Amino acid sequence: MPPSRALPALLRTVLRSTNPSLSFHHHHQTRLLSAYGYEQAKVLGLTSLGEPKDVLKLHSHSISPPHGDALTLRFLASPINPADINQIQGVYPTKPTFTTTLGTAEPLAVGGNEGVAEVIAKGGNVKGVEKGDWVIMRKQGFGTWRTHAQTTMDDLVVIKDREGLKPEQVGTVSVNPMTAYRMLKDFVTMKEGDWFIQNGANSGVGRAAIQLGRLWGLKSINIVRKRDSRMEELKQELQGLGADVVVTDDEVESKGFRDQVKEITNGGREDIRLGLNCVGGSIVNSMAKQLASGGHIVTYGAMSKKPVSLPTGLLIFKDIHFDGFWVSRWSEKHPVEKEACVKEVLDLTRQGKFKDVPMDAVKWEYRTKQEELVKAVQGTLEGYRSGKGIFVFGET
Ligand SMILES: NC(=O)c1ccc[n+]([C@@H]2O[C@H](COP(=O)([O-])OP(=O)(O)OC[C@H]3O[C@@H](n4cnc5c(N)ncnc54)[C@H](OP(=O)(O)O)[C@@H]3O)[C@@H](O)[C@H]2O)c1
């Protein structure tokens, strides 16, 4: 039987006298029931697809003590990525995972795909992880906008060394940095001093590409959308991460861009061999035209929702290749490399060589209201943001 949320005062006193480490919180809604090994969990989830503001609801359920292969997690940080929104809207290739195991009459899916959690209890058969260890999700579709979850090791990657790392850093390592890493490595063999060009350069992926590129001796031309305020600050911010050149989309689409690029690349003697496309639309043409023969444009996002249309000469005579990258597919195919890649980026983070993106932390406490959480998710759809939305769990 799930324990009652409001424990009578006498019972609380008795429990505390038998176990002094127990604590009780005297908020409106009394929390803490781990005396029984039960956890009261909350999830931000959906029972039907649609706009986040219309379909996301906060739902509570209780989690029993783990047995056998099961372990119980307490979430620490879960980002709100653009793909999470697309998934809720139903316009993403993978649908949210709907289930009735969380005690709802209708199947419910928990939002979010990325995050970091702490193991708080484990069943007798669980090996390779201890209480207190941090874990991230092995695959898409776990549902990370939740205070607690019960699962098995198949779904998890253990972070073996979390020394000096913040939950926000570990909780955002497996999508954006991984995407940037693979796109820079897996499509074109580049040597030190080669250039790449990217749009959406101030996105999470873009910032990761700037930094990894710099560490690997690559130079970057970075395109951001022109904005009325904070343009110079944004340029400087990206240059601080290692961007060689920062240009606006307006400049790229203007006539003078070709000459500008020539100047940047030592009279055209240094090759631009790779383009990373986060945005779509006509800007991709302007980027492709700057590539050396045989170069690749790798598309990973479609932030403008505009298609890419190409002059055929780029394909026939310049042999420009157009590829796509999807980190979910890559991670499923390469679980071992994924772990190695996560470790490498976290090591760089710890050494101060890889900075996390600006974040808008949304604190999720036991008493945080549904509307605050939903607002943060809905806000992710707006452009010109100051930081990536991320749920950071406090006392849950
Ligand atoms: N394929 C994959 O495996 C993979 C992996 C990770 C991410 N992604 C995709 O990559 C994209 C970026 O993700 P993220 O987490 O890095 O995002 P993010 O940090 O939230 O950044 C969003 C970026 O998109 C730009 N943007 C927003 N609306 C735009 C519009 N209408 N036109 C042009 N640019 C616009 C923003 O520029 P402003 O500052 O100017 O608004 C910003 O640079 C998303 O589409 C995401 O789904 C794909």
Image: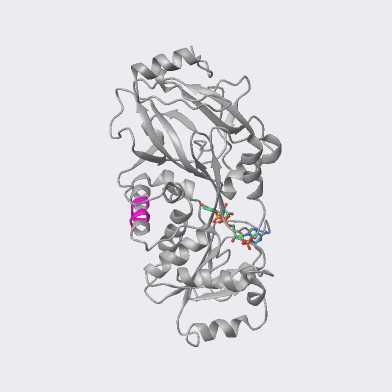
- Residue 160 versus residue 89: which sits nearer the camera? 160
- Residue 159 inside the magenta-drawn segment: no
Q: Residue 245 location in percent, x, y? A: 52, 76
Residue 88 picture quarter? top right
Q: In the picture provided, is 377 more to the left or to the right than 195?
A: right
Determine the residue positioned at 53% across, 86% down: 263
User: Could one spot residue 3 in this view of the protein?
Assistant: no
In the image, residue 46 above or below residue 139: above
- What colour scheme governs how the chains and residues are painted in the rendered image of this protein? one colour
Determine the residue positioned at 41% across, 45% down: 333
In magenta, the rendered stretch is 342-347
In the image, residue 302 above or below residue 66: below
Outermost residue toward the bottom in this view: 267
Q: Residue 222 location in percent, x, y? A: 54, 71
Q: Quadrant of ligand 1?
A: bottom right
Q: Residue 73 location in percent, x, y? A: 42, 32
In the image, residue 331 above or below residue 356: above
Q: Residue 167 location in percent, x, y? A: 43, 46
Q: In the picture provided, is 79 more to the left or to the right than 128?
A: right
Say how many tags the image has.
Answer: 0
Determine the residue positioned at 63% across, 22% down: 106
In the image, residue 360 above or below residue 232: above
Prevailing secondary structure of the magenta residues: helix
Determine the residue positioned at 31% across, 49% down: 163
- Residue 379 versus residue 322: which sits nearer the camera? 379
User: Could one spot residue 21 in this view of the protein?
Assistant: yes
